[in-house]
């Protein structure tokens, strides 16, 4: 069976932050020994709660000072309580799978010495249930209510109107955010993210209407562009994995129907996303996550490389994997698509096999 204690002992602060991000919980403030998060253990939207959820970085425990729903709880308890807001049947085992998938970890590395045979069946069962239970399809007509207004800043960066129209990007004046519909590979609308221009709840989060309706979806289960770019990816048998929607829109502006970019909604690859790539017939995957370093020789660059290798370890059993390292162009926290087209094509041409 899985050794939960051993799993928790391997988690770093960076891992915890990735799980918070995947849950949609913003970190509002940080000190040496405590981070304050939005109290979304009992609220679906960050707009409806204060930052009263404490994460203690010396013990890796969480306490909610609003409702007392967490008192010295661990990360699995937070995941379970948070996800039960959307699915009352969500279990402890679901929360374990959520953490493993979010961080790209292999359960085989955390088996106890007493018994190992049953855990694979449990993992398979709950991964199937997670996929089935979390898939919600929304009515496309909701998108008609958002004005087709485009953010000039993105246009100035080279994203063209045709690409914005193709992906049905719009604007929500009431909440001052860009509307970014997410579709599954079948074309069904499974959620809507907003790129917000105000507040401390994170730039990207699910869109919430004034009537309280929230278009939340599990970002660990989908990739932005998987419907729009499926045909090109299947034909070329290649995919470029980036972090955010803007990179997919930029790729479409350059390459149109030949684009093979998919956004992970972060930098983590889950087993569900791997299944989607396999269903497209992908043979080669290029990792194009943001360059969170300035000098190829500094400590940040080493952390970036560790992140790349962790992502690659999830992909290599199924695909040929390479990465677009950047040791030539200046661009701190840039996506490969934030450079010029010529610079991007240089990085892609010189990608490194892993």
Image (cartoon, rainbow, N blue to C red):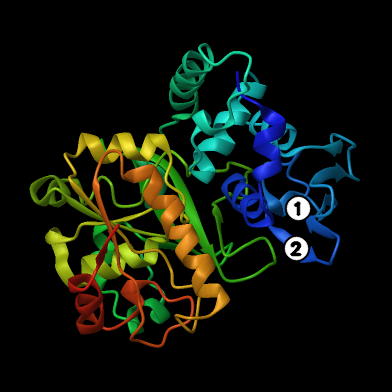
For image coordinates 81% across by 57% down, the residue present is 36
Residue 88: % across, % down? 65, 21
Q: Is residue 324 above or below residue 50?
A: below
Between 57 and 184, the one lying in front of the other is 57
Between 314 and 217, the one lying in front of the other is 314
Q: How far apart in space, not on screen, are marks 2 and 1 (Cα)?
A: 7 Å
Residue at the extreme front: 113
Q: Which residue is mark 2?
A: 28
Q: Does residue 250 show up?
A: yes
Q: Quadrant of residue 214?
A: top right
Are there few (<14), some (14-19), or many (20+) residues within 10 Å of tag 2?
A: some
Q: Is residue 197 above or below residue 269?
A: below
For image coordinates 35% across by 41% down, the residue present is 140
Q: Quadrant of residue 350?
A: bottom left
In the displayed structure image, the side of residue 327 where residue 351 appears, left or right:
left
Residue 232: % across, % down? 13, 52
In the displayed structure image, the side of residue 129 where residue 12 appears, left or right:
right
Residue 345: % across, % down? 19, 76
Residue 38, labelled with which disc?
A: 1
Are there few (<14), some (14-19), or many (20+) residues within 10 Å of tag 1?
A: many
Residue 190: % across, % down? 41, 39
For image coordinates 26% across by 41% down, the residue present is 277
Between 245 and 295, the one lying in front of the other is 295
């Amino acid at each position: 069976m899985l050794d939960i204690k051993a799993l928790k002992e391997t988690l770093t602060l960076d891992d915890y932050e990735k799980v918070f991000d995947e849950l949609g919980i913003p970190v509002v403030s940080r000190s040496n020994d405590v981070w304050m998060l939005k109290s979304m253990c009992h609220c679906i939207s960050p707009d409806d709660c204060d930052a009263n959820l404490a994460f203690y970085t010396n013990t890796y425990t969480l306490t909610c000072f609003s409702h007392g729903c967490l008192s010295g709880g661990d990360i699995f308890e937070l995941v379970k309580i948070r996800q039960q807001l959307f699915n009352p049947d969500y279990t402890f085992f679901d929360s374990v799978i959520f953490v493993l998938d979010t961080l790209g970890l292999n359960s085989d590395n955390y088996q106890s010495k007493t018994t190992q045979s049953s855990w694979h069946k449990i993992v398979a069962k709950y991964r199937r249930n997670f996929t089935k239970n979390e898939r919600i399809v929304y009515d496309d007509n909701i998108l008609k209510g958002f004005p087709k207004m485009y953010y000039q800043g993105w246009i100035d960066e080279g994203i063209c109107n045709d690409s914005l129209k193709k992906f049905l990007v719009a604007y929500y004046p009431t909440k001052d955010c860009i509307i970014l519909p997410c579709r599954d590979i079948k074309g069904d609308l499974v959620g809507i993210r907003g790129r917000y221009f105000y507040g401390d709840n994170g730039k990207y989060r699910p869109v919430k209407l004034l009537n309280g309706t929230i278009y939340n979806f599990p970002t660990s289960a989908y990739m932005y562009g998987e419907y729009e770019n499926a045909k090109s990816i299947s034909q070329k048998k290649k995919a470029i994995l980036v972090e955010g929607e803007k990179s997919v829109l930029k790729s479409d502006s350059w390459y149109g129907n030949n684009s093979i970019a998919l956004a992970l909604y972060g930098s983590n690859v889950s087993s569900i996303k791997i299944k989607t790539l396999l269903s497209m017939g992908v043979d080669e995957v290029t990792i194009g996550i943001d360059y969170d370093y300035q000098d190829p020789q500094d400590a940040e660059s080493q952390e970036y490389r560790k992140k790349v290798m962790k992502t690659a370890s999830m992909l290599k059993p199924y695909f040929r994997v390479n990465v677009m390292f950047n040791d030539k162009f200046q661009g701190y926290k840039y996506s490969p698509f934030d450079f010029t087209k010529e610079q991007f094509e240089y990085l892609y041409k010189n990608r490194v096999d892993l």
